[in-house]
Image (cartoon, rainbow, N blue to C red):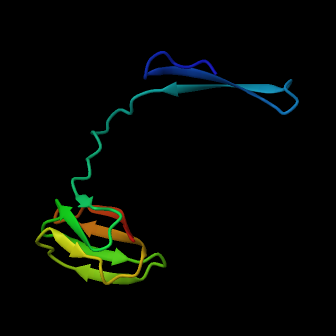
């Protein structure tokens, strides 16, 4: 492999077969996408994660929040969330998916582990 010396540039990769004789040469070009804005940062913070009780949410004001278990069943839902705390203490240990639909209709998904 011949690395690119800059972020924008071309890298050459020489891939050999198991017999170490046959090979293919590939070039990968790194370039910036044009016509696209910077990706929006998720501005919802959740902690502590993993948790054994409460999770604290910041940036989810007036959001609709749904929590799903590992088999996809809805275990909790609230509309127009206000505050900063959700209790996971009544849920069994496991991995949950929290789906947060904000007032601007953006959707953020976070994994929450209950220990």
Residue at 31% from the left image edge and 84% from the top image edge:
90
Residue at 17% from the left image edge and 60% from the top image edge:
58
Q: Nearer the viewer, residue 65 or 115?
A: 115
Furthest-top residue in this view: 5
Q: Nearer the viewer, residue 16 or 10?
A: 16
**Residue 98 appears in which quarter of the rendering?**
bottom left
Q: Position of residue 79 (x, y in %)?
A: 18, 78
Q: Nearer the viewer, residue 38 or 81?
A: 81
Q: Position of residue 39 (x, y in %)?
A: 29, 44
Q: Quadrant of the C terminus?
A: bottom left
Q: Nearer the viewer, residue 71 or 25?
A: 71
> Is residue 91 shown left or right of residue 72?
left
Q: Quadrant of the N terminus?
A: top right
Residue at 48% from the left image edge and 27% from the top image edge:
30
**Residue 19 appears in which quarter of the rendering?**
top right
Q: Compared with residue 78, is residue 48 higher up or lower down, i.e. above or below?
A: above
Q: Compared with residue 39, is residue 93 higher up or lower down, i.e. above or below?
A: below
> Is residue 56 shown left or right of residue 66?
left
**Residue 88 appears in which quarter of the rendering?**
bottom left
Q: Position of residue 49 (x, y in %)?
A: 33, 62
């Amino acid at each position: 492999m011949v690395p690119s010396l800059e972020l924008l540039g071309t890298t050459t990769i020489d891939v050999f077969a198991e017999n170490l004789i046959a090979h293919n040469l590939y070039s990968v070009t790194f370039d910036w996408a044009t016509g696209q804005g910077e990706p929006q940062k998720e501005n919802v913070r959740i902690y502590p994660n993993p948790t054994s009780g409460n999770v604290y949410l910041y940036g989810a004001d007036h959001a609709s929040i749904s929590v799903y278990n590992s088999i996809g069943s809805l275990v909790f839902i609230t509309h127009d969330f206000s505050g900063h705390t959700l209790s996971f203490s009544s849920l069994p240990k496991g991995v949950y998916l929290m789906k947060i639909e904000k007032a601007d209709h953006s959707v953020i998904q976070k994994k929450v582990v209950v220990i």
